[in-house]
Amino acid sequence: GDDVKLSGNIVAGSSDLNLVVPADKDVILDLAGYKIDRNPNVVDNYGMAIYLYGGLTIIDTVGGGTITGGKSLSAGGAIHVSTGNLTMKGGTISGNTATRGAGVYVYRGTFTMEGGNINDNSGQGGAGVFVDEGTFIMKGGKISDNSAAKFGAGVYIYKGTFNMSGSSEISGNITSASEEAGGYGGGVYLWNPVLFAMDGGKIIDNETSADGGGVYIIGGPMPHMKGNVRITGNKGGGADSNLFIPEHCYVILDGELTGGASSIGVTTKILPSDDSPVSFATASDPSTSPWLETDAFTSDKSRYVVERTDSGPLALFLTKFTITFDPNGGSASETNATTGTDGKLASLPTATRDGYSFMGWFTSPNDGSKNQPKPCLPKIQRFMPIGKSILWTSPSSKRS
C-alpha cells in the first residue's frame, strides 16, 4: 500500500487532470486539514477530483480537510469509484457538482463510510452518494444538506446494496423538483432491485416536493430493520412523509427495534379503507417474533393508526373518532357519536331546554366555531331565552 499525507492545499491548474488510483494500488490519503480542489476550467464528463480503480482510504488526522470543486456532466463530482473500494474515515466532501453522485459515485465497487461528512453537493440525483450496481456500507459519518433536482438528494441506490448502521446520519437533504418532474426521496431513493438494511442510524429532517421525504422505494425492494432506527421529521410537499412503502412491499423486521428511541413514520401507496387495512411490516419469522408488538411505527397521516392484524403483520387502519356532546343544562338526543371513515358525522344530535331556543353546537361555551363537528372536539350547545336579547351559555355565565 501507499500512504499520502498532504502538507498543503492541492488546487488543480487549468491543464491538470484528475487524480487516479490504479487497480493495483491501495492508498491511504490523510487530508491533514488541507483541501484538494479540482477547480476545472472546463466542465465535462471527467471533471471529478479522484478516479478510483483500486483501493482508497480517506482520513483526516488534523480536521478540516476537504475534497471540493469537482464538476462533472456525468457521474462523480468529487470521487468516481469504478470497481474499486473506497473507505471514508474522516474529512469532508463538499461543494461538488455532477449529474449523478456529486459527492461519491460508485459503479460496481464498494464504498464504506465510517466517519466524515458529505455535504453541500448538488446534482440531478444522488447528490451525496449515487450507487450503480455497487455496495454502500454506512457505519458512521453524516450525509447532509445536499440538493438534487430530481431524485434522492442524500443517497440514490440503483440495483445495489445499502447497509446503514451505528451512528450514521442522513439529514437536511432536499430534492426540489415538482412531482411531475421527479421530486421523490429527499433522504434516500431506492430503485429495485435493491438490498436495503438498517441496523441503527438516522434519516431525519430531509425534504422533497412529492412522496418519501425520508425514504422513497420504487418497485419491490424489501427494507430490513432492527436496532435503534429513526426515520422521522422528513417532509414531502410540506406534510409528514418519512418512509414511503409501495404496493406489495413490506418492512422485514430481523430483530427488535431497540433503544427506546426507534421511531419510524410510514406512508403507504395504497391507503386503508373502512374494511381494508394496509399491511406494511412483518418479521423474518412472524410466529416467533414478539418484536412485531412495536410502537416504533406511526402513521404519517393522522387519519390512520398502526396496529397488528389478526394474521400477524403490522398495518395501517383507518381511524374513526368519537365526539362528545355537552347539553349545557339541557338534554340531547345523544351525547356520544362516532364519525364515518371521512371523519364526519352524517347528522348532529337535536337538543332542547325549557324556556330556550337552540342556537346550535359550538366548540366552547362562550366562543368557538359553529361547524360540522371536527374529530375529538367536544361540542357544547348554546341557548337563547325566548323573547330575550341576552345569549345564555350556561346557568352561571352570560354575555350581552
Image (cartoon, helix red, strand yellow):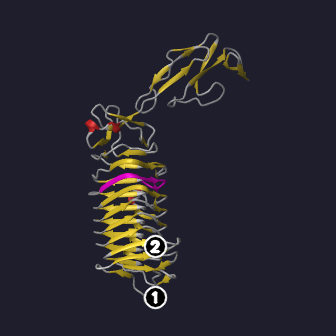
Q: Does the rendering let one see residue 213?
A: no
Decide if residue 95 is on the left or right side of residue 244. right
**Foreground of the two, 4 or 290:** 4
User: Can you give x and y, in whole percent of width and height, for residue 329 in the image?
Assistant: 62, 14
Identify which residue is drawn at 36% across, 35% down: 293
| Quadrant for the C terminus in the image | top right
Instruction: Give the numbered dot on residue 96.
Output: 2
Dot 2, how many residues are within 10 Å of its Cα: few (below 14), some (14-19), or many (20+)?
Answer: many
Q: Specify few, some or many for label 1: CA neighbours under 10 Å numbering under 14, 14-19, or 20 or more.
A: few
- Compared across the picture, whether 138 is left or right of 313 comes to right
Q: Which mark is residue 14?
A: 1
Tell me: residue 19, above or below residue 292. below
**Type of amino acid at the residue the image marks with label 1:** Ser
In the image, which residues are magenta?
195-213
Circle 2 SS class: loop
Q: Main secondary structure of the magenta part?
A: strand
**Does residue 176 appear left or right of residue 112 in this picture?**
right
